[in-house]
Image (spheres, rainbow, N blue to C red):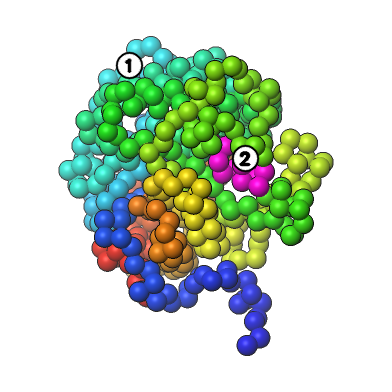
Amino acid sequence: MEVTGAEAAKPKNSTGLGAKPNASEAQFPANFLWGTATAAYQIEGAWKEDGKGESIWDRFAHTPGKIKGGDTGDVACDSYHRYREDIAIMRAMGMKSARFSIAWPRILPNGTGAVNDKGLDFYKRYVDALLAAGIRPSCTLYHWDLPQALQDKGGWPNRDMAGWFADYAAIVTKALGDRVTAYAIFNEPYVFCYCGYGIGVHAPGIADMGQCLKAAHVANLAQGDAFRAMRAIAPNAQIGGAYNMSPAVPATDSAEDRAAAERMHAVNNIFFIEPALTGAYPKAFAPLEQMGFQPGDETRLRAALDWIGINYYFRMKVRADASEKMMGYRAEIPHEGPLTHFGWEVWPQGLYDIVTRIGRDYHLPIEITENGCAYADPPGRDGTIKDGRRTAYFRAHLTELARAIKDGAPVRGYHAWSLLDNFEWGEGYSQRFGLVWVDFRHGRRIIKDSGHWYGQVAAMGAVQP
Ligand code: GCO
């Protein structure tokens, strides 16, 4: 049969978008953790309430020209006040796990020193409400909102950050340790180092690769120091991390492009996993001197992670390029598959590819900590939101995930990004990722058709035809 352009664009061995999978091929384990993910700065609002200190994202978003439309997280989804409504929605959708993050400046307004009890109390109430709803709290300690006071002392490139972060992690684990059993130390350390210090499109808005490399090394030291501090307080907690990952596809079969793809895998996918599990950076990329590596760091870097979180959105095509002095490659999102509103290629097989590789390389339990898509489908006259493309996206990706599990990948949970439409960093509120529509003017929430569909998947433990 001649393969048409559309067919050709469809990922090989994947259901592609809109295809009807055979439900028997998309079953999940009985105790699979179905969940959603959010982050403090993106949903909470209350940016200076109850003693909270300023974060680098407050400062960045209040700086003219940094965020599309001049949006800020000052109010966001107002989840600081409406969290019980959010949790009721999670419960109605049959969720079993909720990824949320702690805003460091709510706990330590100046980053170190006096603890703000009102901040700790908020997260204790949040966790208790999740537990009362039968939902496992999955707590991310750092999803990018650094106390501005610590950035004023140099931020992540400053080696003192490792100790300050470990102290903060200990305070939170002590406060929540009897209620929370699942922690992610960081969310996407590659992104907050590269986008925050390397190219400046994220807070604190610094574009200096030297500072980026130093920040990456300090973040790895902080991951190790925090892991040891948390383990000492909560010996039975599941302590891991959420890492952005894209399968690195060589642009051609040449040796140069294949080597470039491996360098990209080292830099983009495992730069914060290898040091934790081995004490050493990936051989494909280890600029130790530029990172400020010191004797003894190989011990401090170690963190015997209990699980690995994968944030998957798209694959990357990688081409060797000697003119790119630092990494020696250029990587781009291909446009062979359909594109989301954000312009990201929809490539479900990429989830299969990265999950099977990480499972094979590390043999640790995996949770999909983020996967989702931006589409702007608005409420119809009948008040429902017919976001069929988002349902097709999740159906195709979950089908690939079920295939990976069937082929032996140790995946125990999946968190859709995101529960709510929310503040999408530099894009402000222009990119809607939620299973739930948020009316940002009045705070109203409406579960989208995709959210109802996802709830049925969670109830059935299978992707329905
Ligand atoms: C990330 C962050 C999320 C984003 C989501 C969509 O992966 O960048 O964890 O905060 O909002 O991924 O870009």
Q: Up-down: is 385 above or below 325?
A: below
Image coords of residue 444 (percent x, y): 33, 50
Q: Which residue is mark 2?
A: 267
> Of all residues shown, which one is farthest toward the left?
132
Query: Badge 2 local density, few (<14 within 10 Å), some, or many (20+)?
Result: some
Q: Disc 2 to disc 1, how far (Cα)?
A: 35 Å
Amino acid type, residue under disc 1 in the picture: Val
Where disc 2 sits, the SS reads helix
User: Residue under circle 1?
Assistant: 115
Disc 2 vs disc 1: Cβ atoms closer than 8 Å? no
Identify the residue at horizontal 71%, vertical 48% (top origin): 259
What is the magenta range?
262-272
Asked where in the image residue 26 lies, by quadrant, the reply is bottom left
The C terminus appears in which quarter of the rendering?
bottom left
Q: Earlier in the sequence, mark 2 or mark 1?
A: 1
**Relative to the observer, which residue lies in front, 399 or 296?**
296
Residue 397 in the image: state x and y as whole percent.
46, 62
x then y, percent, for residue 278: 51, 33
